[in-house]
Image (tube, helix red, strand yellow):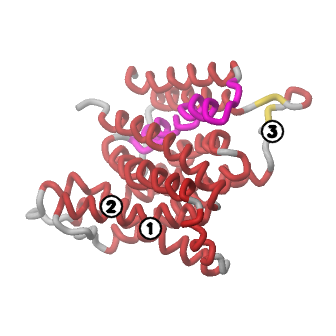
Amino acid sequence: MNHIGEIISLVVAVSWTITALFANEASRRLGAMTVNVIRMVFATLFLAIMLWIATGTPFPIYADGKAWFYLALSGLVGYVFGDFCLFNSYVVIGARIGQLFMTLAPPISAITSWILLGEMMSWKSWIAMIVTISGIALSILSKGEKSKIRFNLPIKGVLLGIGAGLGQGVGLVLSKIGIEHYAQAIPDNASESFSQILPFASTMIRSIVGAIGFICWMALQKDLKKLKDISKDRKGFNASIFATLFGPVIGVSLSLAAVRYTNTGIASTLMALTPVLIILPYTLIYKQKVKSKEILGVAISMIGVALFFML
């Protein structure tokens, strides 16, 4: 099927949009660190059940040392560092603005792929990526004094947003390296179903490392007692569970599948449409007014997406 990687990437963008809406609510209620612990722990459980049903074992079997190394490193960079920054940005500047900084992920991913994998993008793909990112940028930038373009946001929120984009971009490339090593480690006599479930098994490794990382982080900060407050806020807990299903279980697993079928830079660009997709539902939920330039930004971004299929 043509453009399967691009189509999966668009599904990921929708999944991450839903995740951002639930994570925004959960982070404000329970705190970013607590929500991340919930997500990683339950993601590991959900993925274990999925593997058990599909392969007969709840464990990510066949993964060799190289697969574990790169997927674990991806979990630390993408989850522990990246999601820590992202979820804290939700608390400071909200999910709609926080997600906009994820537009940094595609160029960071492309540069990282060039350094680690030697991946090159054609000039046509670069044009499509630039058009897509330009539309997203138009939605978030504003003119300040003397017509200077700037972000009218708290410095803390800006730094957290940049960290989130950096973690997402580098983590995605490390995931691709890890999943390729995992695929090579699968024996020839293994069931075909395991190859199909490979992205989910890879995500489970990342989730295990992410859960350990966040719990250790909370322990060092002596904040583990905050986990006891989870049961006191049912809405916050439920929002965390939905953020888990659409985030590390569905969204992240499909993102690993996407980079197997298309160039990492193209996949990460399409997945970066989440900041555009979130505008409408976020404004309806939080009664925010949509600016005309944001609508124009959406239109330009969609043209960029179309170019990926036309060029």
Q: Which mark is residue 152?
A: 3
Range drawn in magenta: 263-290
The local secondary structure at tag 3 comes to loop
Lower position in the chain sequence, tag 1 or tag 2: 1
Is residue 103 something that shows in the picture?
A: yes
Three-letter code, disc 3: Asn
Three-letter code, disc 2: Leu
Lower position in the chain sequence, tag 2 or tag 3: 2
Q: Residue at x 22, y 64 (%)?
A: 52
Nearer the observer, 133 or 151: 151
Three-letter code, disc 1: Val
The local secondary structure at tag 2 comes to helix
**Horizontal arrangement in the rendering, residue 3 relative to residue 152 (left or right):** left
Closest to the camera, between mark 3 and mark 1, is: 1
Q: Which mark is residue 41?
A: 1
Residue 297 coordinates in the image, percent (x, y): 62, 24
The residue carrying mark 2 is 47
Residue 96 lies in the magenta-colored region: no
Q: Residue at x 73, y 32 (%)?
A: 141
Residue 220 coordinates in the image, percent (x, y): 64, 81
Residue 286 lies in the magenta-colored region: yes
